[in-house]
Amino acid sequence: MTSSEDRRKLSVVLVPEGGRDTRTFAIPYRTLGLFAGLAAVLALGLTIMAGSWWYLAARASRVSELELEVELMTRDRARVQALVSRLETIETQYLTIRNMFGSAQVDELSGVWLPPASLARRDEGNERVRLGASRPSVWPLSERGFVTQELYDGDAGDHPGLDIAVPSDSYIRAAGGGTVVDVGEDAVYGRFVVIDHGEATATLYGHASATFVRLGQSVRERQVIALSGSTGRSTAPHLHFEVLVGGEPTDPLTFVEQPG
């Protein structure tokens, strides 16, 4: 049985402009309710679709960001691997140098002149210590050391001598007899000594931890003039050794020979 509510209708009257005839449409409230429900469902569906699109767009943007992060992490990993390889190489070189220094229990080249002493003697290698000025010909250390940089071996070609890695406080000895023409300390060479050997030839010894000679003092071949260190512009203990001929740097290895 149909109730009075179900029989209620909404009348819609259409009046044409300038016309007399009208049209009346009677729409049951029940039908209107169905249309309203369909409209609500459609609106809800459109809202869900719009929300899903926004979510998918946000996820797509996040995927692009993640891809960029993965690319950056891949690059960083490659750099880290290169750094690890470099550190392994440096560690190997360091161990080689340390083992070389640590294994030298008795130094066959430890013949040095330590004042006071007689005017002439024979050192442990049975080589006569020459007095007076002489051409530099003796290795400037009582130890073999390890040559880390040679003449003009720098990137800018501005390295005027020989760098020899050696433990701190090793004996630095005069490569030849002569006169101390400069001794002191500056920002680059740290504590240093310069010896004039005559015939426009001089030698320079830099980065010392201590010096044992004074300006104008005469020194003889193999005389200990300083101890090795890392003063001045230096990152590790070593001796910077220069040979100057006419004031110009000359390859020290053409004057002295590194011990075998």
Image: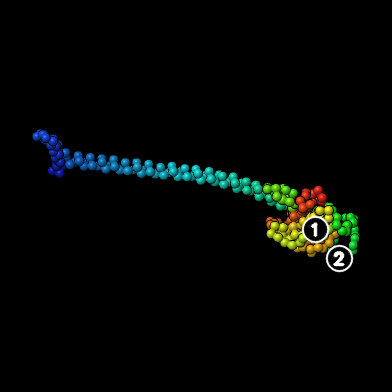
Q: In screen coordinates, is 139 left or right of 68? A: right
Q: CA distance from mark 1 to mark 2?
A: 20 Å
Say which of 80 and 206 sits in front.
Answer: 206
Q: Residue at x 79, y 49 (%)?
A: 253
Q: Residue furthest left?
A: 20
Q: Residue at x 90, y 56 (%)?
A: 128
Please tell me the numbered disc located at residue 195: 1
| Residue 180 drawn above or below residue 26 | below
Residue for point 41% across, 44% down: 58
Q: Is residue 7 left or right of residue 192?
A: left
- Where's residue 202, x and y in %? 80, 55
Number of the label disc, if any, that sits on residue 14: none
Estimate the x, y position of residue 33 in percent, counting from the top left: 21, 42
Quadrant containing the N terminus in the rendered view: top left
Badge 2 marks a residue whose secondary structure is loop
Type of the residue with mark 2: Pro
Among the 4 quarters of the image, the one containing residue 126: bottom right
Q: Which residue is mark 2?
A: 116
Quadrant assignment, res 218: bottom right
**Count of numbered labels shown in the rendering:** 2
